[in-house]
Amino acid sequence: MRERESRRGTLARVTSDWVRRPRVAAALDGACLVAFVVLGRGSHGLNGGSDWFLTVLWPFVVGWYAATFITGLYRGATHPWRRAVATVTLGVTLACVIRLVATSRSTPVVFGVVAFSFLLLTTVGWRVATRLVTRVRARASV
């Protein structure tokens, strides 16, 4: 009982054991960033090569991981859901600013809204999914 109480509000309540490892969580979040660029490319019918892919991806990688450092997403023990939402909000904002300033690419508001929505759904979504699997497994083992 004590162990369960001490885990309240921590990342342990959000994800399963293997996903709580910061490197695994960071890699899964990175996969969400890559998926955003790949699916965006496909939905717009763009045929750019690896240069195009990296040009679109790198501002999101820099913005995302800077935001995780600021919010403490991978190392913070309290308020994991708030940290995740704050990371998405700050990460997408930083990515859009970096994209505009460093790559001289236009960044329409709708692009930011789509990026925010997609990354919120995917980065929080995999956390929710792993939490649900953990709960189902825990109930099944009782």
Image (tube, helix red, strand yellow):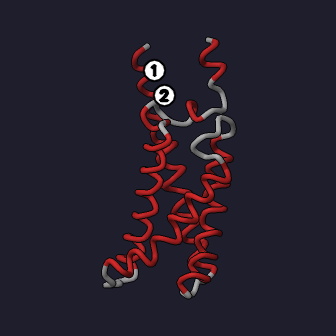
Tell me the residue at 45%/71% (across/down).
57
| Callout 2 crowding tier (Cα within 10 Å): few <14, some 14–19, many ≥20 | some
Looking at the picture, tell me which residue is in the foreground, 31 or 115: 31
Whether residue 120 sits left or right of residue 23 in the image: it is: right
Quadrant where the N terminus sits is: top right
Q: Which residue is mark 2?
A: 135
Q: Are marks 2 and 1 in contact (CB under 8 Å)?
A: yes
What residue sits 66% from the left and 32% below the top?
9
What amino acid is found at the position of numbered circle 2 in the picture? Arg
Element type where label 2 sits in the image: helix
Q: Which residue is mark 1?
A: 139
Disc ID at residue 64: none
Badge 1 local density, few (<14 within 10 Å), some, or many (20+)?
A: few
Query: Where is 9 relative to 115, above or below?
Result: above
| Nearer the observer, 68 or 43 | 68
Where is residue 23, by image quadrant?
top left
* Figure quadrant of the C terminus: top left
Q: Is residue 95 above or below residue 10?
A: below
Q: Amino acid at mark 1?
A: Arg
Name the spot of residue 61 as percent of width and height, x first.
Answer: 50, 64
Q: Residue at x 57, y 81 (%)?
A: 102
